[in-house]
Structure formats: C-alpha cells, structure tokens
Amino acid sequence: MLRLALLRLPFFALTIVVSSVLIFLASEVLPINVGRNMLGTFAPQAAVDALNHQLGTDLPMVERYGRWVGKAVTGDFGNSTSQHLPVGPLILRRAANSAVLALAGLVLILPIALVLGTIAGLTAGKATDRVISVVSLILTSTPEFVVGVLLLLVFAVHWRLLPGSSALIGAASPLAAPLKLVLPAVTLALVDVGYIARMMRASMIEVMASPYIRAARLRGFSPARIVFRHALRNAMVTPITVIMIHINWLIGGIVVIEAIYGYPGLGQLMLSAASAKDVPVLEAGALLFALVAAATQLLADLLQAWLQPRLRSASA
C-alpha cells in the first residue's frame, strides 16, 4: 500500500502544479485593475499606479506567478481586496465551515445510500427494489436548489420547525448552532443519496451473480454469511470510488446550498469574491478546491486497492 501511495504522489503533485497554472492564467484573463478596484473609481491615477506597483500587479506574468506560488506554499495568499483581511485565515475559516457541512451531509449519505443500495441489490426485480430505485431516480434528478427551496418552505416557513437561515454571527462555529446545520445537511444528503444507492445496487447485483458467490451457496453457507462475509466488501469497491469522486460534485452542490441558506462557507465566500472581483480570494479558493479534488482522487485509489488486493498488485 505504501508503494502504491508513493507511485501516486508524483501524479498528485503534477495535478496541483497544472491546476495552479490554469487558475493563475484564468485570473489573468479577468479585466481587473486591482489598484483601481481597491481605491475606488475616483482615486487619482498616480495613487492607483503606486498601489499596483506596491502589490506587484504591474510585473511580468511569469514573475507574478513565481511570487504567487512562492507565497502560496507558505500559506501567504495576500489580502482580500474587498474585505481587507488576510486571505489565508479567511479561506481556512470558511473552508472549515464548509467541511463541517460536508461531513454532516456524508454522515447522512453513507449509511442511508449503502443500506438502500444493498437492499435493492439483494431484492432485484421485486417491489422493494422498484420502490428504492424509483425514489433514488427522483432524488438524483432533482437539482439542489429545488430540494433546498422545498425544504425551506416546508420546515422553515410553514411548520417553523427549523431556522430558514444558516447565517452565523461573526466568526462563530456552525457547531455552536447545530439546528442551523440541519436543513443544509439534509438537502445535501437528499441530492446525493439516490445516486450512490443506485451505484451500490448495481454493484451488489454484479457481485451476487459472480462464480464465488454461487460456490458459497453450493457449500451451504447461510445468506447472511454470503452477504456480510463474501459479497459486501467487493460490492463496496465501486460505490466507495464513486463516493470519493463524488466529493468533488459535493463541493459544487455545497456552493448552491450555501447560497440558498446563507451558510458562511467557502462557496458563499467565492460567490461574494466573484461579485467583488476579489482576485486573491478567488485564486486561493480555487487552488484549495483543486487540492481537495486531487487528494480525494488519491484517497479513492488507495481505498480501492485496499478493498481489492488484486488491483493493488496490478497497480504496483
């Protein structure tokens, strides 16, 4: 396993380097005069030029990229041009809030999706399977903003059981107000649980039809032993890989959900930064998203190899 991890690390590093180049080039395309954006429309041109020189935005592109990367590896992303705060702590605080929301969503998604998918796979073609499949398909086909608005109307507006806004005061942790996490986390779970349940169902059907499962039946093993000891581990290879890849899609869903509920996470910060043309925040946030995507892909490869030793030896 360690050898496989070492083999994957160069690809991980290459992904981050390529992502950083693309992010920097994308930010260069934006027609933004940073000095003018910070000082305002009516500031003297001399003051704008002096600030651009101080910030280094008038340097050649290659030199600016080198400076940006050099500071980024030490955690220094400069100051936000809209909030006038250091970008590093700002991004980390918002990313921590988004991580809490994503973790709360995954805590709901994983057990529900894997159990529903396993039941559907073991009862393939029966009424239970049809009900689970139809519900999964409906949930998968419904966009995040539709689910979010429906839950908001039902539980916050009509029944008034839960707060409709997940906004927090100052730098308060979302764990200090857990009720504000419920609707965003349930929205996240409902959107993703159907897709992963369908993956688990298909994988379970394929595994239950394999020769070694038929051999276990011929030996007289009990259905529970066949499922829990022989089928479940192999059936989880595909869903776990999908879950790790799905984390990237989860991040996209989080951006929408944070906007609906006013949740102070990284997604909402990126939306605000895009509106204010806050390039340092956009660059740092995009780089963090790329880092998370590459890390989850690496983790997916390692988990897949751990669940199927045959893949581990082939990859090594």
Image (tube, rainbow, N blue to C red):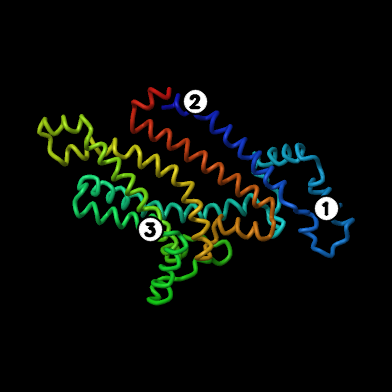
Task: Kindly report the distance in space between the C-alpha atoms of the residues bearing marks 1 and 3.
Answer: 48 Å
> Where residue 51 is drawn, which disc sits there?
1
* Residue 4 figure quarter: top left
Camera-side residue: 146 or 228? 146
Q: How many marks?
A: 3
Q: Name the residue under label 3.
A: 190
* Residue 160 figure quarter: bottom left
Task: Kindly report the distance in space between the C-alpha atoms of the residues bearing marks 2 and 3.
Answer: 36 Å
Q: Which residue is drawn at 60% across and 47% down?
A: 286
Under mark 3, the amino acid is: Leu
User: Is residue 151 positioned above or below 26 on the image?
Assistant: below
Mark 3 and mark 1 in contact (Cβ < 8 Å)? no
Q: Residue at x 78, y 54 (%)?
A: 33
Mark 2 lies on a secondary structure that is: helix
Under mark 1, the amino acid is: Leu
Q: Name the residue under label 2.
A: 7
User: Is residue 205 positioned above or below 161 on the image?
Assistant: above
Under mark 2, the amino acid is: Leu
**Is the residue marked by circle 1 packed among few (<14), some (14-19), or many (20+) residues within 10 Å?**
some
